[in-house]
């Protein structure tokens, strides 16, 4: 395996599932891509606005110089280009401030505007001996490429387009600025501009990839901090955080909040008879099946061992009992499968509805007491707390 294949394999192993990156450098999962755009790109809005503000200030500051150095139609043309350039920058600044999620398109558009305006102004001012040599004139386009390729967000396609435009204008202006200089100077100026812009493009692509990998790693760590590693359900910490939030919300809105607490019947005996690997598969099966019956607002957590909790916002105890019976029935109809064998799964469930002002321990304790009554009454049933 070559070093490149090893790097690709390591990256594929590190970034899997929702955090996997496609060939275009974007996340395969639309949700992850949208979250990255919201967190990472929108955070760069301030940089974009500062850059555009500095460029706009520089454009405005050059108006007096135009009035002193130019006259006639040349002055009118330069002033018109500068005015249009300034208006375009302000419009793009407003677009970037108002719609930060579109920055990966707005920023490259600003870069293209800078390249076109700079090229027009360079040609209008002229490329005579007193206007700088090939390298000096070409470097202003390299500088524009540096800012808009490296500092500001862009899609991969937009970055390639901007790089091609910056390279073409730098070479073009180097040729126009020969002014009797040796051809080797023009060639070296163009080659230097192309080389620097190519390095900037590679570095920009690498920086974007590193930002995405860092975001993906942080996202994975955040999810692991609140997820049960075996089943993928929320863990105990996440459950109590969700319970505190939902209890506060229910208290403000005076909407019902219910809890279904349950565990797998005879699970310890099952593990002793069939092994922990089979028991783990039963728990994964249970979580996967129950998730298919939940709403997006519900919170489903593994509290420990074979004990699970289901928090149901905007649900009274009668509706929670219906949910509990539906889940119990679904588990009874779909046994777990492992190594070609089927293993029936039953659960005992305790149900409670939150009472305004009640602490989470009391809320959970009433559901736990109902769960133990379900076990005492023969298991495989749901009991409502008194």
Image (spheres, helix red, strand yellow):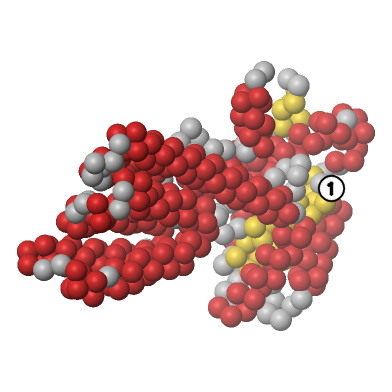
Dot 1, how many residues are within 10 Å of its Cα: few (below 14), some (14-19), or many (20+)? few
Q: Quadrant of residue 2?
A: top right
Residue at (52, 56) in percent of width and height: 40
**Residue at 80%, 57% in the rendered image:** 371
Expressed as whole percent of the image width and height from the top left, the position of residue 33 reads: 49, 48
Q: Position of residue 64 (x, y in %)?
A: 23, 75
Q: Is residue 374 or residue 113 the one in the foreground?
A: 113
Q: Pick whichever, 320 or 180, lies toward us.
A: 180
Front in this rendered view, residue 109 or 164 = 164
Estimate the x, y position of residue 362 in percent, counting from the top left. Answer: 80, 72
Give above or below for 29 relative to 9. Answer: below
Give the residue displayed 11% in from the left and 68% down from the top. Answer: 71
Q: Is residue 41 visible?
A: yes
- How far across and how far down the image is residue 136, in percent? 35, 51
The residue pinned by badge 1 equals 305
Q: Secondary structure at mark 1?
A: loop
Query: How many marks on residues?
Result: 1
Q: Quadrant of residue 191?
A: top left
Image position of 186 (left or right of 14): left
Residue nearest the observer in this picture, 371 or 30: 30
Name the quarter where the N terminus is drawn. top right
Position of 47 relative to 200 (above/below): below
Task: Say which residue appears at 76% left-offset and 21% top-offset.
Answer: 339
Residue 156 appears in the figure: no
Horizontal side of 43 relative to 169 (left or right) equals: right
In the image, is 19 to the left or to the right of 171? right
């Amino acid at each position: 395996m070559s070093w490149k294949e090893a790097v690709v394999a390591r990256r594929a192993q590190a970034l899997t599932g929702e955090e996997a990156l496609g060939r275009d450098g974007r996340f395969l999962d639309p949700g992850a891509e949208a979250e990255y755009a919201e967190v990472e790109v929108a955070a760069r809005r301030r940089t974009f606005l500062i850059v555009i503000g500095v460029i706009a200030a520089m454009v405005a500051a050059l108006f007096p110089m135009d009035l002193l150095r130019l006259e006639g139609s040349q002055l009118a043309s330069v002033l018109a280009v500068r005015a249009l350039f300034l208006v375009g920058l302000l419009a793009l600044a407003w677009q970037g401030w108002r719609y930060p999620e579109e920055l990966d398109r707005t920023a490259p558009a600003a870069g293209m505007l800078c390249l076109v305006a700079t090229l027009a102004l360079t040609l209008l001012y002229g490329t005579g001996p007193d206007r700088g040599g090939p390298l000096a004139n070409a470097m202003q386009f390299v500088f524009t490429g540096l800012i808009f390729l490296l500092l500001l967000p862009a899609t991969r396609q937009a970055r390639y387009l901007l790089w091609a435009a910056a390279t073409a204008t730098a070479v073009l202006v180097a040729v126009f600025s020969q002014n009797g200089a040796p051809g080797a100077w023009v060639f070296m100026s163009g080659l230097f501009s192309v080389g620097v812009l190519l390095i900037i493009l590679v570095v920009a692509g690498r920086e974007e990839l590193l930002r995405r990998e860092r975001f993906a790693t942080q996202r994975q760590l955040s999810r692991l901090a609140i997820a049960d590693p075996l089943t993928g359900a929320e863990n105990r910490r996440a459950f109590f955080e969700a319970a505190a939030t939902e209890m506060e919300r229910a208290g403000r809105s005076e909407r019902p909040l219910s809890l279904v607490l349950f565990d797998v019947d005879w699970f310890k005996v099952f593990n002793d008879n069939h092994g922990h690997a089979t028991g783990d598969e039963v728990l994964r099966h249970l979580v996967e099946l129950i998730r298919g019956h939940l709403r997006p607002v519900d919170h489903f957590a593994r509290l420990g061992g074979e004990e699970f909790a289901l928090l149901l916002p905007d649900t009274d105890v009668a509706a929670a009992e219906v949910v509990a019976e539906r889940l119990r029935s679904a588990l009874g109809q779909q046994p777990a499968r492992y190594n070609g064998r089927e293993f029936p799964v039953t659960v005992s469930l305790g149900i409670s509805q939150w009472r305004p002002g009640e602490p989470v321990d009391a809320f959970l304790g009433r559901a736990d007491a109902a769960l133990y009554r379900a076990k005492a009454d023969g298991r495989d049933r749901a009991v409502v707390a008194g």
